[in-house]
Amino acid sequence: MEKNTTSQGELKVYKIKSGDTVCSIARELNIPIMSIFMVNKHRNPKQLTIGDTLCLPNHKDQC
């Protein structure tokens, strides 16, 4: 599996690839979907395009 994440402090940046949805990203990376929504409040998850980026919580530091 190709890595599409890079770390930036406490957040990771994920580059959207073909077929990605917020749900599939959460499932693939084992991150709660609500955590993704919380750190991307300004983004509409229905308007993701290939090459866009999402911030992801560094779930290792949580719980």
Image (cartoon, rainbow, N blue to C red):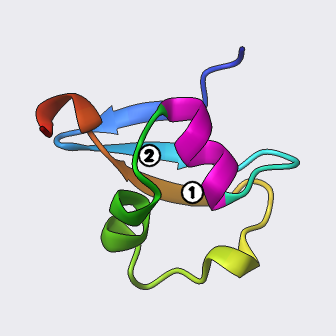
* Three-letter code for the amino acid on which mark 2 is drawn: Val
Tag 2: Cα neighbours inside 10 Å, few (<14), some, or many (≥20)?
Answer: some
Distance from label 1 to label 2 (Cα)?
6 Å
In the image: residue 63, left or right of residue 23: left
| Residues in magenta, as a range | 22-29
**Residue annotated with mark 2:** 13
**Magenta stretch holds residue 50:** no
Q: Disc 1 or 2, which lies upstream in sequence? A: 2
Give above or below for 15 relative to 44. above
In the image: residue 50, left or right of residue 56: right
**Magenta stretch holds residue 28:** yes
Tag 1: Cα neighbours inside 10 Å, few (<14), some, or many (≥20)?
Answer: some
Residue name at image x 72 percent, y 14 percent:
1
Residue name at image x 34 percent, y 59 percent:
35
Residue 53 disc label: 1
Q: Are marks 1 and 2 in contact (CB under 8 Å)?
A: yes
23 or 50: nearer the viewer: 23
Q: Main secondary structure of the magenta part?
A: helix
Give above or below for 32 relative to 36. above
Quadrant for the C terminus, please: top left
Residue name at image x 73 percent, y 79 percent:
47
* Three-letter code for the amino acid on which mark 1 is drawn: Thr
Residue 2 disc label: none
Secondary structure of the residue carrying tag 1 is: strand
In x, y percent, where is residue 48? 72, 69
In x, y percent, where is residue 57? 30, 48
